[in-house]
Image (tube, helix red, strand yellow):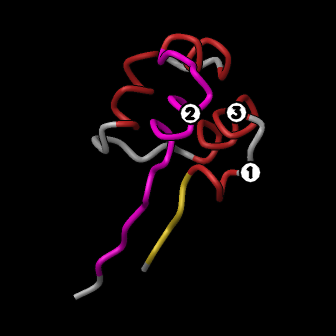
Amino acid sequence: MNTETVVCRLKEVRTNLGLTQRQVAEGADINVRTLINIEKGRAIPNLLYAMKLAKFLGMRVEEVFEYFD
């Protein structure tokens, strides 16, 4: 059985920076509901959203999202 996992550190990074979900969503130009779903693990961001989020946070995508297979 193949189990793939994406570890999302978005909430941890966001709270460490003292940012609200709305601030991050607006700064990354994504919908706040989408951001919430990503943080709660209900959705895995597409590449564009992952890049937008990482850029806004001043980080590399790999620092915010990590893939394990």
The picture places residue 64, in percent across and down from the top left corner, at: 59, 49
Snapshot quadrant of residue 19:
top right
Indicate which disc residue 60 carries: 1
**What residue is drawn where x is 49% and y is 48%?**
9
Magenta-highlighted residues? 3-21
Which residue type carries mark 1? Answer: Arg
**What residue is drawn where x is 62% and y is 28%?**
17
Query: Mark 2 or mark 3, which is nearer the start of the sequence?
Result: 2
Q: CA distance from mark 1 to mark 3?
A: 9 Å
The picture places residue 57, in percent across and down from the top left corner, at: 70, 33
Q: Is residue 15 left or right of residue 59?
A: left
Mark 3, secondary structure of its residue: helix
Q: CA distance from mark 1 to mark 2?
A: 16 Å
Q: Is residue 2 left or right of residue 45?
A: left
Indicate which disc residue 16 carries: 2
Crowd class of label 3 (few under 14; some 14 to 19; many from 20; radius 10 Å): some
Indicate which disc residue 57 carries: 3
The picture places residue 60, in percent across and down from the top left corner, at: 74, 51
Q: Quadrant of the C terminus?
A: bottom left
Query: Mark 2 or mark 1, which is nearer the start of the sequence?
Result: 2
Which residue type carries mark 2? Answer: Asn
Q: Indicate whether 3 appears above or below 55.
A: below
Snapshot quadrant of residue 1:
bottom left
The picture places residue 43, in percent across and down from the top left corner, at: 35, 42
